[in-house]
Image: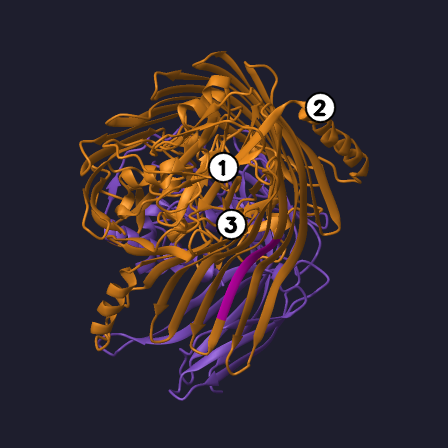
Chain colours: A purple, B orange
Amino acid sequence: MKTLRYPFLLLLPLWLMACNLTQEVDLELPEYDPQVVVECYLQPGQPYLLTLVESTGYFEDVELNYVRDAIVTITHEGQTDTLQPLEFRFDDPLLGLLIDTAQLGILRPILGDGLYFYGSFTPVPTDYNSDFALKVRLTDGRELSSVTQILPPVPIDTVEWRFDEDSLAFSLTKVQDNPNQANYYRRLLQRRERRISQDGQDTTWVSDVEQDFTLDDEFSNGELLTFGTPFVYRYQDTLINTLYHITADYYRFITTRDAAITASFSPFGQPAVVYSNIEGGMGIFTGISFDRKVTVIGE
Amino acid sequence: MIQVSILPRLRLLLLLLLLPLLIAGQSWGQSSYTLSGVVRASESGETLIGATVGAPDLKIGTYTNDYGFYTLSVPATGDSVEIRYVYAGYTTEVRRLLLTEDLTLDVDMGVASLEEVLIEGNSVQEQLQSTEMSVERLTMADAKILPALFGEVDIIKTLQLKPGVSSGSEGSSGIFVRGGGPDQNLVLLDNTLVYNPSHLFGFFSTFNSDAVKDVKLYKGGFPSQYGGRLSSVIDVKMNEGNKKKLSGAGGLGLIASRLTLEGPIVKDKASFMISGRRTYADLITSIINETQTDNPDWNPIPDYFFYDFNAKLNWEITPKDQLYLSGYFGRDKFKFDDSSFDFNFNWGNSNAALRWNHLFTPKLFLNTSLSFTDYQYTIENQFDIFSFNLGSRISDLSLRTDFSWTPNNRHAVRFGASGTYHRFIVGRLDAGASDESFSFESGDTYYGTELGAYISDDYDVTERLRINAGLRVSGFLSDSTLYGGLEPRFSARFALSENISLKASYARMIQYLHLVANSGASLPTDIWYPSNRNVRPQGSHQVAGGITIGIGDGWIITNEIYYKWLQNQIDFRDAANLFVNDNLDREFVFGKGWAYGNEFYIEKTKGKLTGWIGYTLAWSWRQFEGVTATGDFSVDDQINGGEPFHPRNDKRHDITVVGIYQFNKRWSVSAAWEYRTGNAVTLPVGRFFSFGPDFITNPGTIPTLVPDFVARNSFRMPAYHKLDLGVVFKMFPKWGESDLTLSAYNAYNRRNPYFIFFEPIQDVNDVFTGAQAQQVALFPIIPSLTYNFRF
């Protein structure tokens, strides 16, 4: 559905190719007031983790500006957890455990000295529809805050497949939407694929993202949602279907963020101010729950 | 504007309607005779709109109406009186008449054999004497002389060369008038509304130059017969068809060809006109695709073309009754076929109108029309066994009747009423699989009824002072909600001298339909949406004042200053989903706007050198402070933090210089230079990394770089300017007339900015290390050669 949102974009490359009239320009953008950006996703059973960075001027160097030494707390049902700064410098072998070496090399220009975030080893409780309150106090005295909830997961009803005459299969994933409330979802479909190295010696399993989009149920409230795929799967392909049940705040954060990204390269995009539920800063504090089904085609 | 019973106000309206009629009626007892008739072109029988009919000795005069009809009260002096019929480009006709009773006199005027161009818009005298202001009138003759993009003559683009009118972007046939939005223009083709008057994403208008006779654009001072839009009225009249002989016209151009045939069905009684136009780029692309059918690596080139078709029949049933049947049908078709993926995107307008003119008496003229208009788009996707079809549509059925009553030379009264039944299909979606493994349908249909009634009197108060006072009452019923309002209109002309007039106007406008378009471009997927309990009608007040100076016989200077207040302006929440959405109401935010400016215009209408210079200095603002439809406050309903901002098409300076030089009967050259302040656009000033939820569970995920847009439209694109040149060489073969038109669009090859985007700079590992702003221009210098003919 998302790919069809701007079908006229198909015409744009034609025009640009035909005219070849693109030229570099130097822009003098107005002075930018950096903002503190929070991202914290509460996933039941996972530790509390939070990233805290500062936004920069559009043409400044591309590097993560970590906001260090902040006091970060999350309070739930009267119990407050303080998230500790966690820093993994590039020479820290622990970082190699988190990120594989090749990827680390790619990320190095962005990550700067290493990886810096806040965390607590207390697992996020599986407690739906009750408030989690975030407070962040910066070293200069500024305070950021937010409140969110974790919504209960929405189960995936069925995952079906069907073969055509060329022995290719498509998949249908069905989900029953609750008609009594507004629901927001993130649909993630991955195909687990075995990749064999060129010399045939090594075998690795990778999960390619086939579909990743958000939707609200305004258009189909209370109906059986059906997510389809084209005929691209072969016998014994493994599909990982994940349906995240997300908050309205997170839905708006994602849609405005995507709109902002689109508008930076498309004349048809309408620039959007990225939605935030962080008082005193930018970003998102939200709970995430999901249901997942792993399916082997043909079995 | 009211949302309750409008009956008490209707009683007041009735009283106001009757008052001028009673005043006007007092003049009936004067001793005079009525001279009336129709003024036509002798070679075709085509009626002439706006021809001057006057008796200079008696200092009386009038103009033919939209159907070529005139009526003039001539005092019974007992002497013969000289009546002059004047129309630019035609030989003046003079009749000396001794009137002893009312007389009907139809006059045929012949084309003047002048070796010079005549700009046939508002004549100097008409502009000096009329109460109308803020009006631009063009005929196709004007547009055909000027150079055009790809050689496709476009009357809307010619209007964009007038002060106060601008296009949205390079090459666009969209119209933005005095700080108004693209949805605030009432576009009428033979009194029938056209909802999307453009082809190819706005690059070409739907009006085929060979089928169009006359265009009038109102930027303010709107006559009371018009309603439903805030910022302009574009009234396009089609040719009626040659009543004398079979004739034709056509042209072969760079991207399209066209052909028009017209002729009598019954000589001098009934005629027809049919006209068609089609682009042919798809014929080339389909041949290229066919040659590559055996190439598995070939990515097919999408096929695109548009066509339109105009037709008109007219029949003079009796000398007092005339019947017209006219229609328009146009489609844009975009098609992409691959082995497994079919994509078809079609859109277009359909219009039809049946119109009846009746002359009750030489002083009372009736025009009644029944019309249908439809705009729709459909997107059809087929991918393997899956289909996904989407579309929206608006259809109107309208009935309107207009009376023109000229009790004497001092009053010209117009009154009438109209009713329109709207049907909106919004976001119709059906998706499914051919094996019936799933199917899904959605979409909403809305209905609305729009009513209007009006009266106006163009009244010569004194020899110097002429006023036009009118009142329109309008109403709209949809979703069990009734909106209504009174729309007073007033304009006045005070003649300081024979050649200098001061003018002023006020107009209240109400708009009940809204265009849902969340983009700077004109897109076929923009849809119309009715007012309802959550979406209130838009409204405007506009005041304007100006001076008109005639110099000699062929020069005119006007200067107008205006201020416009806009209420209930509509914009959309950030990241609004306007494409597949059952509940568009929740995506709207409401605010206000205001615009003001000064328009200077000097025009030379006669001689070997003709043309004009226009300069507009203008400001336009919008403000969305966060007031919701229910009157509550919400930060989510704010745009730009609630602070005022310029809309994208705010243009501080707008200069146009147009010149046409006619060397002789065969050769003429033309040039048009435009300069406009760059569009106001929103650019990101900051950026941040978004990790997303997967970064924690999979830290190897590359964070997304997100642009931070702060202030709406706070950045200005570089100024837009270009020069278009044209040369016309006319030939006169035995069978008729033809010409070769060579034009150069953007002659000095200016790279005018269409949009700015940011190209990522990546290192060897494809990691983002920065961004470079890139400016995209659409059209370099584009020479084109068009062959036109007429027989």
Q: In this rendering, would B205 be left or right of B225?
A: left
> Is the magenta region chiefly helix, strand or loop?
strand
Give the residue number, with chain letter if any, for mark 2.
Answer: B26
| Residue appearing at x 26%, y 39% in the figure | B147
Looking at the picture, which amino acid does disc 2 mark?
Answer: Gln
Residue type at mark 3 is: Tyr
SS type, badge 3: loop
**Residue B434 horizontal side relative to residue B786, left or right:** right
- Residue B278's label in the rendered image is none
| Apparent side of residue B602 relative to residue B498 in the rendered image (left or right) | left
Q: Nearer the viewer, residue B594 or B581?
A: B594
| Label pair 3/2, CB-CB below 8 angstroms | no
Dot 1 falls on a residue whose secondary structure is loop
Q: Is residue B392 magenta?
A: yes
Is B243 covered by the magenta stretch?
Answer: no
Badge 2 and badge 1 in a common chain = yes
Q: CA distance from mark 3 to mark 2?
A: 43 Å
Q: Which residue is labeled 1 in the image?
A: B105
In the rendered image, the vertical position of residue A114 relative to residue B437, given as above or below: above
Vertical placement of B181 versus B22: above or below? below
In the rendered image, residue B641, in percent from the top left (x then y), is placed at 56, 33
Q: Which residue is mark 3?
A: B195
At numbered mark 2, what does the secondary structure look like: helix, strand or loop?
Answer: helix
Which mark sits nearer the N-terminus, 2 or 1?
Answer: 2
Residue B151, position in %: x, y? 26, 46
Spatial distance from mark 2 to mark 1, Cα to Cα?
26 Å
Span colored in magenta = B388-397
Looking at the image, is mark 3 or mark 1 earlier in the sequence? 1
